[in-house]
Amino acid sequence: MSLAVVTLFPEMFGALTDYGVTGRARDQGCYELALVNPREFATDRHNTVDDRPYGGGPGMVMKAPIMEAALTGARQALGSVGDKARVIAMSPQGQRLDDALVRELARAPALVIVAGRYEGIDERFIETFVDQEVSVGDFVVSGGELPAMLLLDAVIRQLPGALGHSDSADEDSFADGLLDCPHYTRPEAYRGQQVPSVLLSGDHGAIARWRRQQSLKRTAERRPDLLAGVALSEQDRALLEE
């Protein structure tokens, strides 16, 4: 998959490209990531990318012409798929990121993520060039880089070959609308707590049933709002009753 990020702080993305699952996925060729700094397209000697907002108020706003030039640079960096890239701007005003949106974005031929700073980006750039604004939650952080890394990490996990086991992403929380079940490893006893006996039984059918029940139970207790969007089978309802 071809990815690009428009950001004032490209060095931050080493946390994504150099470590863990996403670092290995890059080394294995699951994706390519281009980083484009809007300051490269500034036209004054101070490399200014922002200005005071019309109408007054605190903070600064990123300039539309410079962001347009940076977006063009990002598309060019993506090569032949650049013109087909879906442009996503990270914004508290955007659609809430969830598993369904992550899987949708993972199917795109290419993505350009725009990470804004300051008070935001000139709305004319958003209206003209951005396909979708995406939020990672109802809170505000200092810039779009961390939200962009969250989105990219979630998308990269969906790419073929990114995870060690092909079923790993499908067993994560939210993959089927529910929270994940609890997990255990050695030792069998820890601080007086035992691993549930069913997980030691070798009965794969019983283990699958227990995991499904625990997933349903955890969702009902912690995120009952999620159950409203899940089509529960009769067996699921019976497990919940238990």
Image (cartoon, rainbow, N blue to C red):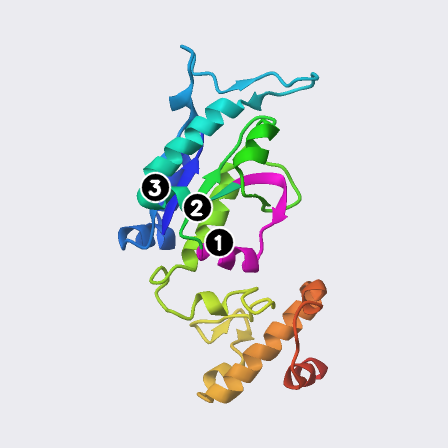
Secondary structure of the residue carrying tag 3 is loop
Q: Position of residue 27 (x, y in %)?
A: 27, 51
Secondary structure of the residue carrying tag 1 is helix
Q: Position of residue 176 (x, y in %)?
A: 56, 69
Q: CA distance from mark 2 to mark 3?
A: 9 Å
Q: Give the extent of the magenta segment.
A: 89-107
Q: Is residue 107 above or below residue 62?
A: below
Q: Name which residue lies at 71% across and 68% down.
A: 228
Q: Nearer the viewer, residue 87 or 80?
A: 80
Secondary structure of the residue carrying tag 2 is strand
Check disc 3: other Cα within 10 Å, few if <14, some if 14-19, many if 20+: many
Residue extending furthest toward the top: 45
Q: Is residue 40 above or below residue 177?
A: above
Q: Is residue 120 in sight in this rendering?
A: no
Amino acid under disc 2: Leu
Look at mark 2 in the image and give the residue it sits on. 111
Quarter location, residue 178: bottom right
Q: Is residue 230 left or right of residue 132?
A: right
Look at mark 3 in the image and give the residue it sits on. 78
Asked whether the beta carbons under mark 1 and mark 2 sit within 8 Å of each other, the answer is yes
Asked whether the beta carbons under mark 3 and mark 1 sit within 8 Å of each other, the answer is no
Q: Name which residue lies at 60% across and 73% down.
A: 215
Look at mark 1 in the image and give the residue it sits on. 105
Amino acid under disc 1: Leu
Q: Earlier in the sequence, mark 2 or mark 3?
A: 3
Q: CA distance from mark 1 to mark 2?
A: 8 Å
Q: Position of residue 100 (x, y in %)?
A: 56, 60
Check disc 1: other Cα within 10 Å, few if <14, some if 14-19, many if 20+: many
Q: CA distance from mark 3 to mark 1?
A: 16 Å
Q: Name which residue lies at 44% across and 51% down.
A: 153
